[in-house]
Amino acid sequence: MSKVLAIILSPEEGISRSDRELLAAGRILADPLDGQLVAGLVGASVEESQAAEAIACGADKTYLAGDPLLVDHNSEVMLQAVEYLVQELQPQAVVFIGKTSSQEIAARLAYRLKTGCVLDCVEMSVEQSSGRLLLTKPIYGGKAVALFAASQTPAVVVLRTRTVDPAEPDEARQGDVETLSLSLDSSRVNARVVERVSEQGEGVKLEDATVIISGGRGMGGSEQFQVLEELARLLNGSVGASRAACDLGWVPASWQIGQTGKKVAPQLYVAVGISGASQHLVGMAGAKHVVAINTDPNAPIFKIAELGVVEDYKNVVPHLIEELNQRRTN
Ligand SMILES: Cc1cc2nc3c(=O)[nH]c(=O)nc-3n(C[C@H](O)[C@H](O)[C@H](O)COP(=O)(O)OP(=O)(O)OC[C@H]3O[C@@H](n4cnc5c(N)ncnc54)[C@H](O)[C@@H]3O)c2cc1C
């Protein structure tokens, strides 16, 4: 029977929303193949409770690949564990969800297996006539889309986050759980975490936000982002930024949305002083409604905005805040 292996890295805090997206995507491949969706939980402390969550979210079987060496996302030993799982299961596809650690491991895994790898995949399906996996990914900074047909197995795929709706847990689902005993080579641990610094974050995480107010170079400076924070607060949203604003040091790099930043899919995305470069659009392509405020009527952002305001943001955003405040008090 064909197997699709969904790799869930470090699930210590449970199966996350993006893991549920991964499991939903795994079913998209496993079902037309009449195959089995197998979840491989790889981490320092993987437990039956996480396996049960994975099964509730669509896995037919879950393997627990735990080892104390798998702490701190050490990619070298993570790779060893994932490779072991793949060799044991011989799946038709190995699917990861798009985090930096996944991309690193997926590419190296494909190299070791001498197979193909598609990173940043936004759509996956199975060709009915041949059973081949078809994988779509944006290229040239989102200006074009490439379709790949997997000619080797296993196909190694990293799915971009927020491109598939997350699987809803069904507690009634049943599945097997098997614990693997790994023998990892500790001499391969060549990096050590010496300190952890948590970023202070307020409000909703960008990836989970339903409203995002995003600012670009047109904001003019760091302090000017305060109006965006105020607007976001009134709309229960989060603040994002273009790379230009992050590179200028106006806002933290973790606010960056785009090709080399976060991929978001809010209901409402308000782009303020952002030109709409393709590398930015790639990160917000999942937004349902886009509003743009920009002084330049020819800014590319207006091509994708549902509502465009050609105006200096200083003449628009404060009025929006005032209006929202007034509605709150009424
Ligand atoms: C490999 C690569 C990866 C990249 N990855 C990313 C990425 O992940 N994310 C990203 O964002 N970019 C990325 N970029 C950079 C991208 O190409 C653009 O340079 C960047 O997005 C531009 O940011 P911006 O729109 O804020 O600035 P600009 O392009 O300078 O646009 C500023 C806009 O503000 C408007 N404006 C000025 N003043 C006002 C005002 N008072 N009120 C309203 N509007 C005003 C202007 O008309 C202009 O349209 C990447 C580039 C490369 C080469």
Image (cartoon, rainbow, N blue to C red):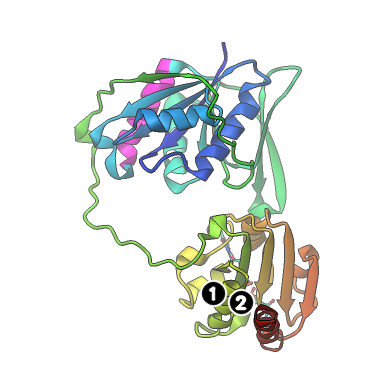
* Residue positioned 74% across, 82% down in the render: 295
Residue farthest to the left, as pictured: 187
Mark 1 crowd level (few <14, some 14–19, many ≥20, 10 Å Cα): many
Horizontally, is 187 left or right of 95 in the view?
left
What are the residue bounds of the magenta stretch? 74-88
Residue to which mark 1 is pinned: 245
**Ligand 1 under 8 Å from disc 1 Cβ:** yes
Q: Counting residues from the N terminus, which is met first, the one under dot 1 or under dot 2?
A: 2
Residue 118 in sight in this render = no
**Is 327 part of what is drawn in magenta?**
no
Q: Quadrant of residue 47?
A: top left
**What is the spatial separation of the Cα atoms under label 1 and label 2, in whole angstroms?**
18 Å
Q: Nearer the viewer, residue 292 or 20?
A: 20
Q: Position of residue 12 (x, y in %)?
A: 35, 40
Label ID, residue 231:
2
Mark 2 crowd level (few <14, some 14–19, many ≥20, 10 Å Cα): many
Residue farthest to the top, as pictured: 1
Q: Secondary structure at mark 2?
A: helix
Q: Main structural element of the magenta stretch: helix, strand or loop? A: helix
Residue 273 in sight in this render = yes
Which image quarter has ligand 1?
bottom right
Name the mark nearer the viewer: 1 or 2. Answer: 2
Horizontally, is 118 left or right of 294 in the view?
left
> Label 2 sits on what residue type?
Leu
**Is 82 part of what is drawn in magenta?**
yes
Q: Nearer the viewer, residue 188 or 235?
A: 235
